[in-house]
Amino acid sequence: MSPGAIADVGAVSTQIRRILRELGVEPEVVRRVGIICFEGETNIAIFTKGGRITLMVWDDRVELFFADNGPGIEDLELVRRPGYSTAPDWARELGFGAGMGIPNMEKNADTFVLRSRPGKGTAIRATVWRKGNERQGSSAGPGA
Amino acid sequence: MNAREVARVLGLEPLAFPHPEAEVGGGFCSDLLSRAMAEASPGDAWITYQRHLNVVAVAKLKELSLVILARGPEPEPEVAARAEEEGVNLLRSDDGMFELAGRLYALLAGDPETHPAERG
Amino acid sequence: MKLREVAEVTQAEVLTGRELLEREVDKGCGADLLSDVLSVVEENFLLVTGMVTLQAVRVAEVMNAAAVLIVRGKRPLEPVIAYAEEAGIPLLATQKGMFETCGLLYSRGLRPTRFRRVSEYAG
């Protein structure tokens, strides 16, 4: 991936934020979804040649799906560890790649599912529950 | 003021502290290695979120008095090991850059009112 | 502290949001690494950064920050300024470096933001 795509990072998050606000989604939910999306699109920009982000808004929850055909994640335990990063130097010099992306996505989601196959790509589903529908739980495992 | 005194007042945790007597002449903040290379002055305490191994190399080249890793994940063990090897003071804090800069700035300016760590 | 005071204390130029200078900012956060800004647990803070990229403004927007103060005399490109204007994010720029800027604002009473603690993350 080249540093070019990184210039667009945040474009999806801010657009999603506007959509959710217009739909009257609770501000705290909007903020958490915004953070998750920002981290997710940063990863797509740094590590892949592109991917798809899907937003689904329900009465009781907001869901974000990230899917890419990138290099995949070799070690799913390591990537969840704060500070672990394989980001190239150019990304660090642009203020990215501190190794908090996946941990921060996971922390802001009520349910977080990460599936990745090295060489094939990565898929993530992050759910944020609305109004008192909070439910904790996450999983990360190989294969999809 | 030397690095030991700065570490004590700011409540910093040493990861590598080979030269506690180093004189702290000023402060510098950046998370970008290139900026630190270009803009930090010798004797500065460098406050950063960056945990890249090259932080040590930059601190050494620029003759900085210490590196303060602002709040964040633990750096990889080889970062502290390299700092020890290269004779670079490397300390960490649970406080963010804004607070560390604020308190160090006050400390170097000799303003006792803004040292929360020194109060009761 | 009002944005007007932030601009005075740091001798900053106001690039966008001149009509919002009476806005109160409660807290300050200094960072170039945007992931650190994304772990702030409060809103309505002043983001002090050396980044002049569009992403810095977008992070401020997503985090409901009160304003962005750019340090080291960097000036963002016109599209970035236009974006901030449209998004309603006041954009200020000072010649001073990050250390001095944070130092001056802290000494005038601007408090640091709280962050999500690293130990709260799964690992």
Image (cartoon, helix red, strand yellow):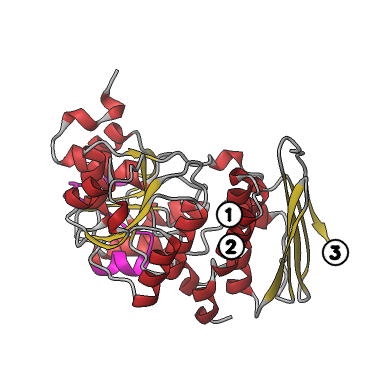
Say whether marks 2 and 1 touch (CB < 8 Å).
yes
Q: Is residue B20 magenta-colored?
A: yes
Q: How far across and down, in percent of the image, does residue A99 sit?
A: 56, 58
- Residue B73 lies left or right of residue C81; in this view the side is right
According to the image, label 2 marks what residue?
A13
- Label 2 vs label 1, nearer the camera: 2
Label 3 marks a residue whose chain is: A
Q: How far across and down, in percent of the image, does residue A89 sit?
A: 48, 72
- Residue B84 lies left or right of residue A67; in this view the side is left
- Residue A89 lies left or right of residue C105; in this view the side is right
Task: Name the residue nearer the viewer: C17 or B73.
Answer: C17
Distance from label 2 to label 1 (Cα)? 8 Å
Distance from label 2 to label 3 (Cα)? 27 Å
According to the image, label 1 marks what residue?
A35
Quadrant in which residue C89 is drawn: bottom left
Counting every numbered tag in the picture gives 3
Q: Give the range drawn in magenta.
A: B18-38
Q: Is residue C81 magenta-colored?
A: no
Point 25% across, 31% down: residue: B115
According to the image, label 3 marks what residue?
A143
